[in-house]
Image (cartoon, rainbow, N blue to C red):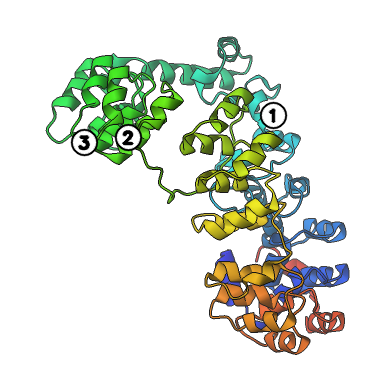
């Protein structure tokens, strides 16, 4: 089957124009149904994948004979997951696999979970290949936590996961589970964990090279022979860095590596919770700034000790939202972090989505850019002034995510129409009061993203809007403009030839 990219590249101007109509919030239900029934592939792709749909259109999508059309709806991030979940028993593996894989979202973005009963059905009835994608992103926290004791055997098997994180009583129950596959998986997990804690086994099985060697050096229990071999090898600098983060490292080796000539090794040692007071004091005045920064966040330091360290917090980090922990953090620990004088520790607090109102208000005015932007990225009640300020000041990865936050403002954004940054100029497209002349001017902006954003603004003068419908670049955006004349929408859709044999489309 052609990829979505190939489908769009193959679309001609009329098809791209109709794809814009499919996205237009003013397009009535009968137009959407006609586009679904008779539209070319690019139109059906955009319609089913890129917008919320009326219930009647959803019903028609679910019954559509074309496999690819249904599969696009299976990955729609805009609709209620319960609507996508109705494809759980689709007759085509291709559709079921896309439902399991889930919506395509920017890396790290939180995906709304499917209903628990649907995920359970998928685990219980789908073949493994259909679940090898990103279904984990679509599992609710409650279901994840209940998996090891779930009544469905295949779900319990999925819940084994990190063996060492399971309570002893649950481990025992899984090892004695009535289902043979669950028992076998539990035994395998218990055996692998026991081996990872056995220095003799690790020494015997440690590969000479490759990813498995690095993982074992970082996380498995290491014998003294393995450690000494790495310490004495003349070209093992990176491997010393690997063992520096290993929790089983002997105390005397921690002391030794705290004075390693490689600053990357010292930096990893500086993060260790078992770092002694003398080593903390030595690393606090290390000549390398990255080492000083690493030790400055050590949990055993007092706030006064942190403040005495000459550290500098970089602002070129990627301030983006990531999925939160399965178990919420202790509110007292979050408050302690928010009260810290160290920006990196306050940033940890800013990532808590349940931050109470007083801490939300305080951190919204924090002097550190990272604290403010992370708060804006994570907190569901981040205020409008914080969101706008963060967007204006932060230019790193996932900046655009800020504009999707619930409270991102619209009023007053026309003031940025002449800003030197094109992403900021494009904010004028969000202001319903941007002057028509400004909207028209920005459809000729040097930046293509600005041109496309303003082509969808309802204040675009009608003559310019009509002109853009024949523009190879902007026809798609212009046809999505909610101010498009309803009669013109009907005329555009009337150009479609009725499908003679819709069944012949299936599988295309």
243 vs 109: above or below: above
Label 1 secondary element: helix
Question: Which residue lies at the image location 56% right of the left edge and 72% below the top edge?
Answer: 419
Residue 101, how many percent across, how many down? 60, 47
Instruction: Give the residue at x 64% y 29%.
Output: 144
| Camera-side mark, 2 or 3 | 2
- Kindly identify which numbered label has been placed on residue 262: 3
Looking at the image, residue 446 lies above or below residue 89: below
* Left or right of 345 on screen, residue 451: right
Q: Identify the image quadrant of residue 260.
A: top left
User: Picture coordinates of residue 464 (x, y %)?
Assistant: 71, 87
Q: Quadrant of the N terminus?
A: bottom right
Residue 463 % position (x, y): 75, 90
At label 3, counting other C-alpha atoms closer than 10 Å, the crowd grade (few under 14, some 14-19, many 20 or more) is: some
Residue 497 visible: no
Residue 82 showing in the rendered view = yes
Q: Nearer the viewer, mark 2 or mark 1?
A: 2
Mark pair 2, 3: CA separation: 14 Å
Q: What residue is pinned by disc 2? A: 292
- Identify the residue under disc 1: 142
Residue 297 on image: x %, y %: 42, 30
């Amino acid at each position: 089957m052609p990829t979505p990219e190939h489908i769009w590249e193959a679309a001609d101007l009329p098809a791209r124009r109709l794809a814009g109509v499919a996205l237009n919030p003013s397009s009535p239900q009968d137009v959407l149904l006609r586009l679904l029934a008779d539209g070319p592939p690019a139109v059906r792709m955009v319609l089913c994948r890129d917008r919320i749909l009326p219930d009647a259109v959803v019903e028609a999508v679910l019954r559509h004979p074309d496999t690819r059309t249904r599969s696009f709806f299976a990955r729609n991030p805009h609709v209620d997951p319960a609507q996508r979940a109705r494809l759980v028993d689709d007759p085509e593996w291709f559709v079921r696999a896309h439902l399991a894989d889930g919506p395509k979202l920017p890396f790290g973005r939180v995906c709304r979970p499917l209903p628990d009963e649907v995920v359970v059905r998928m685990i219980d009835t789908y073949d493994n290949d259909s679940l090898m994608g990103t279904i984990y992103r679509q599992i609710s926290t409650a279901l994840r936590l209940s998996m090891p004791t779930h009544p469905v055997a295949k779900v319990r098997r999925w819940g084994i996961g990190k063996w060492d994180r399971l309570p002893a009583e649950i481990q025992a129950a899984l090892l004695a589970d009535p289902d043979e596959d669950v028992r076998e998986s539990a035994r395998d997990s218990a055996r692998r964990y026991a081996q990872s804690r056995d220095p003799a086994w690790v020494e015997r099985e440690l590969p000479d090279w490759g990813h498995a060697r690095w993982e074992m050096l970082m996380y498995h229990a290491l014998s003294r022979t393995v450690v000494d071999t790495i310490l004495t090898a003349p070209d093992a600098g990176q491997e010393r860095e690997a063992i520096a983060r290993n929790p089983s490292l002997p105390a005397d080796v921690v002391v030794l590596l705290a004075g390693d000539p490689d600053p990357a090794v010292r930096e990893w040692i500086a993060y260790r919770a078992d770092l002694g007071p003398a080593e903390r004091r030595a690393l606090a005045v290390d000549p390398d700034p990255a080492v000083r920064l690493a030790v400055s966040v050590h949990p055993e330091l007092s706030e006064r000790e942190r403040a005495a360290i000459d550290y500098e917090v970089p602002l070129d980090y990627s301030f983006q939202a990531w999925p939160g922990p399965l178990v919420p953090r202790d509110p007292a620990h979050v408050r302690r972090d928010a009260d810290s004088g160290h920006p990196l520790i306050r940033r940890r607090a800013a990532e808590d989505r349940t931050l109470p109102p007083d801490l939300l208000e305080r951190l919204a005015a924090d002097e550190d850019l990272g604290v403010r932007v992370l708060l804006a990225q994570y907190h569901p009640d981040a205020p409008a002034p914080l969101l706008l300020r963060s967007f204006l000041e932060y230019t790193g990865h996932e900046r655009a995510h800020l504009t999707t936050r619930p409270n991102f403002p619209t009023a007053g954004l026309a003031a940025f129409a002449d800003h030197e940054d094109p992403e900021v100029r494009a904010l004028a497209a969000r202001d319903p009061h941007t002057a028509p002349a400004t909207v028209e001017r920005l459809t000729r902006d040097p930046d293509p993203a600005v041109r496309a954003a303003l082509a969808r603004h309802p204040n675009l003068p009608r003559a310019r809007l009509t002109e853009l419908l024949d523009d190879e670049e902007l026809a798609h955006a212009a046809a999505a403009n909610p101010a498009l004349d309803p009669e013109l929408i009907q005329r555009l859709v009337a150009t479609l030839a009725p499908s003679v044999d819709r069944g012949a489309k299936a599988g295309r």
